Amino acid sequence: MERLIGLDLGSVTCGVAISDPLGMIARSLTTVRFPADNYKQCLAEVLKILEEHKVKTVVLGLPKHMNGDIGVRGQISQKFAKMLEEHDITVHLWDERLTTVSAERILIQGNVSRKKRKKVIDQMAAVQILQSYLDRQNGGF
């Protein structure tokens, strides 16, 4: 199985996670920072990461409202997915509801300071997105 990259796309940051070669475990990789709403620059940085790690498949978080509707942030993720697909990247949009909340809880339980949490929260959310996708693919819950 090939490695996968998980993305948590925000308006100025994009958390990045990567799977192990067997597609079982996700780990944090980096946070891409870019000027507000400059998704072309974010795309360029993500494409560099994909090339560096020889990855052709991305699991991109799809923000949804609690009722399942897709709002503005979700539409931005859908557009970003299309941008990736134009570069021959396979994209799986994955429901990311509450991943940031879950990531925040994990960091708080680990006694990570507020300052450090702010630096890694997007990476941790990307790990949550990718790990839930991997679990589902591997027959988990």
Image (cartoon, rainbow, N blue to C red):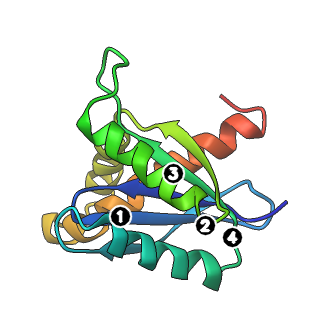
Of callouts 2 and 4, which one flags the residue occurring earlier in the amino acid sequence?
A: 4
- Quarter of the figure with the C terminus: top right
As measured in the structure, the alpha-carbon distance from the residue carrying label 4 to the one carrying label 3 is 17 Å
Question: In the picture provided, is 114 more to the left or to the right than 28?
Answer: left
As measured in the structure, the alpha-carbon distance from the residue carrying label 2 to the one carrying label 4 is 12 Å
Mark 4, residue position: 55
Which residue type does callout 1 highlight?
Cys
Give the SS element for disc 2: loop
As measured in the structure, the alpha-carbon distance from the residue carrying label 3 to the one carrying label 2 is 9 Å
Which residue type does callout 3 highlight?
Lys
Q: Is residue 127 visible in this depiction of the protein?
A: no
In the foreground, 86 or 10: 86
Mark 1, residue position: 14
Say whether marks 1 and 2 touch (CB < 8 Å): no
Instruction: List x then y, in percent, for residue 102.
Output: 35, 41
- Quarter of the figure with the N terminus: bottom right
As measured in the structure, the alpha-carbon distance from the residue carrying label 1 to the one carrying label 2 is 18 Å
Residue at the image position 48 percent from the left and 73 percent from the top: 46
Give the SS element for disc 3: helix
Of callouts 1 and 2, which one flags the residue occurring earlier in the amino acid sequence?
A: 1
Of callouts 1 and 4, which one flags the residue occurring earlier in the amino acid sequence?
A: 1
Which residue type does callout 4 highlight?
Val
Quarter of the view holding residue 78:
top left
